Amino acid sequence: MSAATVELRRTLAARRAQARSRRLSAQAIEGLVIFVAFFAAYALVGQRVVAGQHVVVFDALARLAHAFFVWHDAPPKLAAVGFEWPPLMTLVMLPFTADRALGSSLTALPLTSAVFAAGLLVTLAATLRLLHVPVAARALLIALFGLNPLFVFYAVNGMGEIPYLFFLCLGVFFLLRWHVSGEGSLLALAGISLALGGLTRYEIFVWGALFAPAIWILLLRRGAGPDEIEASLVLYCAPLALAAALWCFFNWLILGNGLFWLEHQASNVAVGRGNLAQVHAHGIPLAHIVSSVVELNAHLFALVPLAVVALIIFAVIRRDLMSAVLASAVSLNAIMTIAFIHLARDESLLQLRYNMRAMPLALVAMAWIAYRMPKAAWRWLTLLLTAAAMTAGIPLVWHTMKTYRYQFMESAFVHAIETGRDQEGASSVGGFRVGVAAERDMAHFILGLPMRRKAILTDDAQSFGVMLLSGHPELFFDRIGRGDAVWHRILEHPWGRVRYLLITRFGEPELARQRYPEALSGRQPGLTLVYENARYALFAVAAKPPATTVHGGSSGWGGSTGSSGSGDSGGQRWLGGQR
């Protein structure tokens, strides 16, 4: 080989490396611009709506409180994350609750969801770029998706929907990259992403299970040998199996039942946990469930039914297996929703948030169809139809959020944006009372009392809002800090051991209220009302046991940390005590 030939090859290799470096730099800049722009927008909107206009979703508040307790309760402990929800729903908030002010001011809520929402849009942009969507079309589609009102609401309210969507879409991105490039290591990244998604929302494990046989069939169609198929499936499945096994281990270690998380979720479906439960003794007609789910998906994101139909046609005509896989992935959420409603006999599982999972997948599906189109004109037509459907869907989603029966304070968000007014004390569709005035009021009163640490006995499963907004959970003797066994002993005989007892008027089960049911009526010996508002009552605890004690219901423990926030801030009373 001549010296000139060697030099030419070196020059071509150097040029290819430079071109690859330029592409990577352009991709990094694009991702950074998308992330910064949308993170800033969502954080600002969230600060205004959540912290300023008090549109606070109590499930998000509960998870924020538990993340806050990890750092600031006495003693601090990771066990404060709890087992009521998948662990990453709370763990993702830890970086923002390390600072006491960020957590207690509720600023951590929009910051957490804004990070994952911006990350999700970056992931979608990378997926569209992988599928050769031109930069102008890519920018338009990402902007339209990021402006979808339902997506914006969950991008600012701190709920777990956006983190698990991020991990789901990241897993699909790596799966598509593996399919396009053939790099086997990408299957491990897909498995890790879906495993993290499953620990954020257990349903994501179902998508993980769906993709495993799809990978096997795709490999068979490529002509892969048994060793390659086995190695690829191990790479993909190992992270999913490890995540489930570790969570089972921690459930067994702490609760004595490795399958507690699975049994707990199954029991929730069986009884129907919706906030507006509509239980029918004879069930709900399957045809009605199917039509309701299809109609809801069309209202939330018109691309969902369009993408499923187009993918099925494409899979049949072009014999494209990946189109069939994506069709299954997009429709899986609807199938699960139909099954859950049928099992629970509860139409409230039609909540808007439960039907968001197909939205980003539908956008990816339309980009895949455009990618597989044989002619450039058809590709552009597919992308234009996608953009038109997304644009037309924005006002429809807005109206749905404003009026739909089964929702989770979406209408309060719409009213906050439309009016610009504080929503504290307003009613939201679904029977929710908006705001945290009662929690903030009681927290403010407590901070004015002279007391030591662990002075207030309370069931944190219901009073977490007061503990969080006080900024000082160490003042409270709660179930998390010392464990249930110790807490129950103090609850049975609090005299001289704690100075105060905080009882929540609403929410079940409330163990302090069950133990002392006559306290709220003023007939409980040894407990003297100090301050109350519409949702909470604070009692001074006698230093010595009273002559007679009125015993209440079962002091058995357990229960949810959820709350619908149905109280308001009216009717405060301060009866004695020193401020």
Image (cartoon, rainbow, N blue to C red):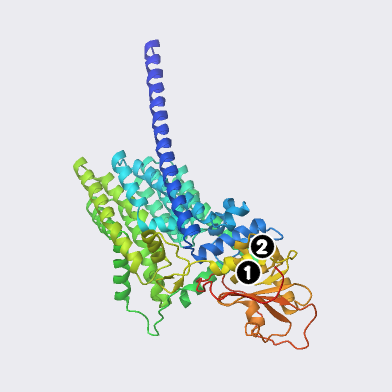
Q: Position of residue 3 (x, y in %)?
A: 40, 11
What residue would you read off at disc 2? 473
Could you tell me which quadrant the N terminus lies in? top left
Q: Residue at x 38, y 22 (%)?
A: 15
491 lies above or below 94:
below
Q: Secondary structure at mark 2?
A: helix
| Mark seen at residue 52 | none
Nearer to us in this view, 290 or 101? 101
Q: Quadrant of the C terminus?
A: bottom right
| Image position, residue 221 (x, y; %) | 34, 48
Query: Which secondary structure lies at badge 1?
Result: helix
Label 2 – label 1 distance at C-alpha: 10 Å
Mark 1 is surrounded, within 10 Å at the Cα level, by few (under 14), some (14 to 19) or many (20 or more) other residues, namely many
First in sequence: mark 2 or mark 1? 1
Q: Quadrant of residue 282?
A: bottom left
What residue did someone put label 1 on? 460
Residue at image location 48% in from the left, 56% down from the top: 197
Q: Give the percent coordinates (x, y) of residue 259.
A: 57, 68
Which mark is in front, 2 or 1? 2
Location of residue 238 with respect to 258 vertically, above or below: above
- Give the left or right position of residue 503, taking residue 294 as reference: right
Q: Is residue 22 visible?
A: yes
Q: How busy is the neighbourhood of tag 2: few (under 14 within 10 Å), some, or many (20 plus)?
A: many
Q: Is residue 117 left or right of residue 106?
A: left
Q: Is residue 32 above or below residue 490?
A: above
- Amino acid on which the number 2 mark rests in the picture: Pro
Towards the viewer: 164 or 548:
548
